[in-house]
Image: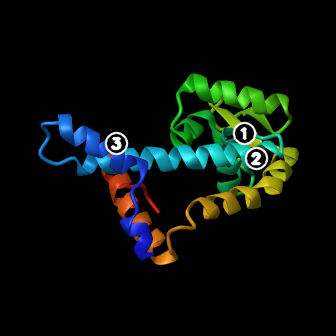
Amino acid sequence: MGDRQQAVDRVDVIMKQVAQVSTAPDLTSKELCQRLQRVAHHLETRLRRELAVFGIEPWEIELLASLRRVGPPHQVTAGSLQDIMQLTTGAVTKRVAALEKKGWVRREVDAGDRRQVLVCLTDEGEQRALEVFATKTETEARVLSALDLATQRRLNDDLRTLLIDLEGAVPN
């Protein structure tokens, strides 16, 4: 672990260059944002590669997982999907339509409020999601494996604090 702390990464090189031209008194937040962006890029790239074997994109598994997480009958309004996935109305419509063509979701009019459209996970969609969940979880664990569990938990807590500040707390 000691060698890793002494090692220099690409962000260190970038930040050294930035420090030479910046008038900002502290670049810690910029440095952290650079690292978060790079880690997110690595995770996305590796997930795409691992999930490609199954013929599924990361956004597809995230939408299926969002429906599965709500529990039976595995359905939410299109508006709720917007909030859950942080997407625009148009993006939700496009993604739902693509998964509907594959038979993984279906749209239904909400019997309780006919103005609402429910997005429902089909049996085929649930089966497809179950086939790839383990691969996704294993890939995420591999990407973060350089950090011990205590460090991952601390980072998780710190990022939760940041997200609550940015997005607000949600009810349990």
The secondary structure type at the circle numbered 2 is helix
Q: Is residue 44 left or right of residue 147?
A: right
Q: Nearer the viewer, residue 42 or 11?
A: 11
The residue that label 3 is drawn on is 14
Q: Residue at x 38, y 44 (%)?
A: 34
Mark with earlier residue (2, 1): 2
Residue at the spot 38% in from the left edge and 68% down from the top edge: 5
Q: Secondary structure at mark 1?
A: loop
Badge 1 amino acid = Glu
Label 2 belongs to which residue?
51
Q: Is residue 145 above or below residue 45?
A: below
Q: Position of residue 23 (x, y in %)?
A: 12, 37
Q: Residues within 10 Å of mark 1 (few under 14, many from 20)?
A: some
Give the label on residue 170, or none.
Answer: none
Please name whichever residue, 160 or 170, is drawn nearer the observer in this view of the structure. Answer: 160
Going by the numbered disc 3, the residue's amino acid type is: Ile
Per the image, label 3 sits on a secondary structure element best described as: helix
| Residue 65 position within the rendered picture, expressed as x and y whole percent measured from the top left | 69, 50
